[in-house]
Amino acid sequence: MGLFGFGKKKEEEKQVPTCCCGSTNQAGESACCGEINSGIASIKVLGAGCKSCHEQYENAAAAVKALGLPVEVEYITDMEKVMGYGVMSMPAIVVNEKVVSMGKVLKAADVEKLLHKLGF
């Protein structure tokens, strides 16, 4: 904030995320080609390509499938990209570009609980 109140940030308007087609439903919720979006834009598993990291990827994919989410889980092993998230312990799970778990392998049921806890 600037001196004497100049440069105050304006209150951010609530923005509804939209899909590639830019559609929303009547309630103003994000909708993708007519389907209501769960709010999850992306899920990534960050790892080194080891057995534990691959297991985390499989568990995350199973959780997404069990929840019926229209999102594909991405498995990232490029260390430059992993370090870009500030992750020092792997595997890690990133939901909507936010690290939500790191340093342990979560079972599929635990990933489901985590996604529910995050509101998805």
Image (tube, rainbow, N blue to C red):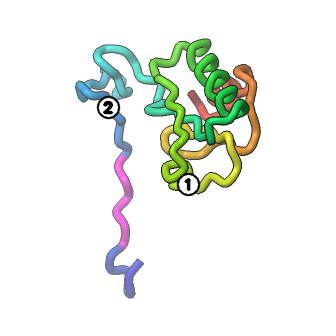
Q: Residue at x 57, y 14 (%)?
A: 65
Type of residue at label 1?
Met
Q: Residue at x 68, y 35 (%)?
A: 50
Q: Is residue 22 magenta?
A: no
| Chief SS of the magenta region | loop
- How far apart marks 1 and 2 lie (CA) works out to 29 Å
Tell me where the magenta segment starts and ends, as one range.
8-13
Taking depth in this image into account, of 109 and 81 the one nearest to the observer is 81
Image x and y of residue 91, in percent: 67, 40
Image x and y of residue 106, in percent: 74, 30
Image x and y of residue 101, in percent: 68, 41
> Considering the numbered disc 1 on the image, is that residue within a helix, a strand or a loop?
helix
How crowded pointer 2 is (Cα within 10 Å; few <14, some 14-19, many 20+) is rated as some
Name the residue tied to disc 2: 18
> Considering the numbered disc 2 on the image, is that residue within a helix, a strand or a loop?
loop
Whether residue 10 sits left or right of residue 40 in the image: it is left
Closer to the chain start, of discs 1 and 2, is 2
Q: Is residue 3 above or below residue 48?
A: below
Query: On residue 83, which mark appears?
Result: 1
Type of residue at label 2?
Thr
Q: Residue at x 40, y 19 (%)?
A: 36
Considering the image in quadrants, where does the C terminus appear? top right
Image x and y of residue 17, in percent: 35, 35
Taking depth in this image into account, of 54 and 110 the one nearest to the observer is 54
Considering the image in quadrants, where does the N terminus appear? bottom left
